Image: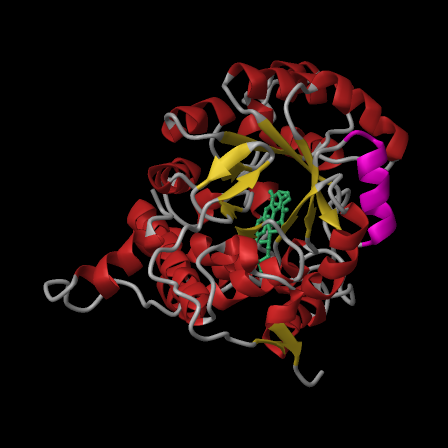
Amino acid sequence: MAGHWADFQYEIYLNGTTGGVPRLPTDLTRLEELTERRLGPGPVGYVAGAAGDGSTERANRAALERRRIVPRMLRDVRERDLSVEVLGRALPAPLALAPVGVLSIMHPEAEPAAARAAAARGVPYILSSASSTPMEQVAEAMGDAERWFQLYWPKDPDVARSFLARARASGYSVLVVTLDTPLLSWRPRDLDQAYLPFLHGVGTANYFTDPAFRAGLAKSVEEDPNAAVLHFVGMFADPGKTWPDLALLREQWDGPIVLKGILHPDDALRAADAGMDGVVVSNHGGRQVAGAVAAADALPRVAEAAGDRLTVLFDSGVRTGADVFKALALGARAVLLGRPYVYGLALDGQAGVDHVIRCLLAEFDLTLALSGHAGPATVSASDLEDGPA
Ligand SMILES: Cc1cc2nc3c(=O)[nH]c(=O)nc-3n(C[C@H](O)[C@H](O)[C@H](O)COP(=O)(O)O)c2cc1C
Ligand SMILES: O=C(O)C(=O)c1ccccc1
């Protein structure tokens, strides 16, 4: 499991005396550039790209970097325990892999490779609705691990019902409902390169295999793939949804439901009132609202509103072990890792994702220890100082 002193600091700093130079860098911020060299500008542009002028994505990093850890000394940190409880589940570390669609543009083994890497470390993998592999196949790759499914809440209620039924039947227990993408935003990097994977049918695997989706088509997917893609674009999400609609989802899903993309404390209150179990404080990695508040700046207020009514998770900008520490100090129970594991997948398949998970957790473990903490439980707002804006 990933938590044992973060794998004894990734096997005594990368395999003791026998390891040699690692296949991938241990500073995860370097992976994007390497991936661009390997795959070229189209696919990397899609993953690295953001909404509008990219200001939200930059703000996500700046908000984490601005906050500085204030380490404490002489607190006996020989034995660390990274584990946390999330939604009634014991996780080896405060980490899950964020839902990222269309992974086949990064690596032929796509989502199953990422899911296997996560499962091997006991880290939950959240499968995207827009995956390039059907959810049943990814479920098999997950083995005994906890299965989390991210729902893009479709406009067609029959497809929504069908997705939930399929997710349940293939053993997914936690539902993550993404609210910040009722439409895809204006993303200049993709538009300027004419690189929109789903227009070529990538990321539609769950839809094209779905009986309810197929029933809504005039001609079959095979006969008229272009019409099927347009149908997908028009119905994968629904800008008409409002808070009362959550009641239907709550009725249709027995397990925990987490709302992803919450940034305002009042929305956290509404989530709790609607019987939700958690929220992900996230701005989708700066990919949706250019000019939006940095996720780390929104986190303390949302966490305060959530109190003990909701489990608060966080993503958007996590790149280092120190970022995980800071997110916990700002009120998150655990973080979701996004782009870095996607680059790990691009560069070295399952082994690349494994490397990314282990680097992040080894660095988190050492950050905890060197800051005077034997585990996440003692990390609090008083461990951070606000640096200059
Ligand atoms: C290429 C790409 C595809 C994504 N697809 C999804 C998705 O299908 N569903 C979803 O809820 N979030 C999706 N996200 C958002 C991630 O879950 C997460 O919120 C984001 O990557 C966090 O930002 P970071 O990668 O900068 O840390 C996607 C992000 C990227 C980069
Ligand atoms: O690109 C994204 O951020 C995303 O969430 C998405 C949405 C639909 C299809 C593929 C990815």
Q: Is residue 223 left or right of residue 312?
A: left
Q: Looking at the picture, how far across and down is residue 75, in whole percent? A: 44, 68
> Does residue 284 appear in the picture of this structure?
yes
Q: Compared to 124, does 370 lie above or below?
A: below
> Is residue 314 found inside the magenta-colored segment of the image?
no
Dominant SS type (magenta): helix
Please give the name of the residue rendered at 54% of the width and 22% of the height, measured from the top-left corner: 222
Q: Is residue 181 left or right of residue 16?
A: right
Please give the name of the residue rendered at 41% of the width and 30% of the height, measured from the top-left corner: 145
Quick one: quadrant of the C terminus? bottom right
> Does residue 241 appear in the picture of this structure?
no
Nearer to us in this view, 224 or 121: 121
Q: Is residue 134 left or right of residue 156?
A: left
Q: Compared to 92, does 256 lie above or below?
A: above
Residue farthest to the left?
18
Q: Quadrant of residue 116?
A: top left
> Is residue 269 found inside the magenta-colored segment of the image?
yes
Please give the name of the residue rendered at 11% of the width and 66% of the height, measured from the top-left corner: 17
Q: Looking at the picture, how far across and down is residue 166, in whole percent? A: 57, 17
Q: Compared to 109, does 195 lie above or below?
A: below
Q: Compared to 230, does 181 lie above or below?
A: below
Numbered circles on residues, count: 0
Q: Is residue 332 left or right of residue 25?
A: right
Please give the name of the residue rendered at 74% of the width and 31% of the height, measured from the top-left corner: 235
The span picked out in magenta is 264-275
Q: Quadrant of residue 78?
A: bottom left
Q: Looking at the picture, how far across and down is residue 66, in whole percent? A: 63, 78
Quick one: quadrant of the N terminus? top left
Nearer to us in this view, 366 or 179: 366
